[in-house]
Image (tube, rainbow, N blue to C red):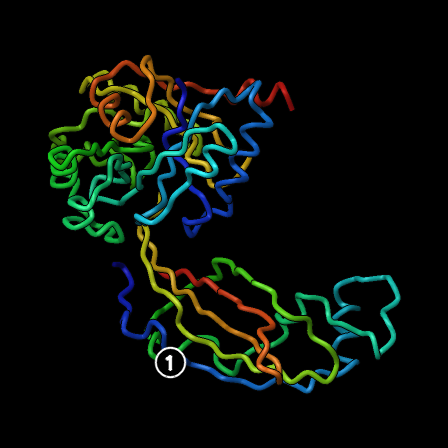
Amino acid sequence: MILDLHTHSDASEDSRAPVETYLKWLVRKRDVLPIDGIVLTEHRQWDPTKDYRRLEDQYGILILRGAEVETDYGHVLVYGVNDDITRRFDFADVRLSALELIPAVAHMGGIAVPCHPGRPTIGLCEHYTSKPPIDGVVAVEALNGGSRRGENERVQQLIDRYGYHAFGGSDSHLVSFIGICATEFDRDVHDVEALVQALRAGGYRPVDFRDGLKMSA
Amino acid sequence: MSVEFDRSIIGSEFDRTVFGPVTVENILEYIAVTGETEPPASPADLVAPPTFVVCVRGHRFMPKNVAGVRSGFDAGKDIEFGVPVRPGDVLTSVSTVHDIYEKTGRSGSMAFVVLRTVVTNQRGEQVAVVDQRMMFR
């Protein structure tokens, strides 16, 4: 099963991509983008009222939700967001403590994983040069569709040293970027709880569809 | 936050400007500068292109109480178009501080101020909502 674990729709202030248009694109590009589902990880927010079940049924693509938050160790994706987590952490705060967030989210039933670790300023690699490692990190986004040359490559050193699991996501903010990088799971994932369990357990890897997409263009 | 803002200014109105009446000449001039080569409709049928609303500018671009900010730049705008503008319309623009938020990127932390301008005509109909983002650091 293949999921794009890192996407932004027009609910994020820097994206212009409607969720339904993402789905139309994935259906149209299914031969080169075999994506079974996407996880919407809007910036610094969590809206409990969002419901995409009608779109899921209409397009046959799983839609899960998480959030991308900002911490003193860079940006972090949070899956399994619930009331306990949003009561404790203000997702709009761009100075959340990663040392506090990552273990606490795990304790409250979710999982928080650093994204684009190779980026300057907002990636884990740079912060690990001057701060202690974070307890409880299970996985890192080893393949990010929005990263620049060299940024994804830096992450391998982190994985080798700390034994983190590796996953991928497109970090799409534009329709044509959805699904270009994703995560292949050995097990089926049909809801957020299963996603959290799967990310904790391992048995997944990043997958890159950019070459196939270029060839089909 | 590298730039400190008083969030209590969110929602505050900082400009109200009346523009017009819009003339046939205003619209024809705008059409000309956009490079349109099709002959315009007769004055009786003339409708301004939707983007004409960007000509409606308030007297003040930013509220006075963010004047302590040293520098910023245009981070883009979203425009929601409403009813069309026709000759004779009197347009009123009302500008408020719609939002202030912070984010971090490759180059460090940034603060964004969203200035919302709502343009209405003499009948109270909404002509446009313009959200102008300014970025400060």
**Is B80 drawn above or below residue A131 in the view shown?**
below
- Which residue sits at x=48%, y=37%? A55
Asked whether, in this view, residue A11 is left or right of residue A24, the answer is: left
- Which residue sits at x=42%, y=27%? A37
Q: Position of residue B9 (x, y in %)?
A: 32, 75
The C terminus of chain A, quarter of image: top right
Asked whether, in this view, residue A17 is left or right of residue B56, the answer is: left
Name the one closer to the observer, A120 or B115: B115
Asked whether, in this view, residue B128 is left or right of residue A186, the answer is: right
Amino acid type, residue under disc 1 in the picture: Lys
Packing grade of label 1 (10 A; few <14, some 14-19, many >=20) is few
Q: Position of residue B109 (x, y in %)?
A: 31, 52
Asked whether, in this view, residue B53 is left or right of residue A155, the answer is: right
Q: Position of residue A33 (x, y in %)?
A: 52, 22
Name the one closer to the observer, A217 or B68: A217
**Is A27 drawn above or below residue B38 in the view shown?**
above
Q: How many marks?
A: 1
**Is A2 drawn above or below residue B16 in the view shown?**
above
- Which residue sits at x=24%, y=16%? A202
Quadrant hosting residue A162: top left
Q: Tag 1, which chain?
A: B
The N terminus of chain A, quarter of image: top left
Q: Position of residue B17 (x, y in %)?
A: 54, 85
Quadrant hosting residue B48: bottom right
- Which residue sits at x=69%, y=74%? B85
Name the one closer to the observer, B12 or B127: B127
| Residue that badge 1 annotates | B64
**Is B33 drawn above or below residue A149 in the view shown?**
below
Quadrant hosting residue A68: top left
- Secondary structure state at the residue bearing disc 1: helix
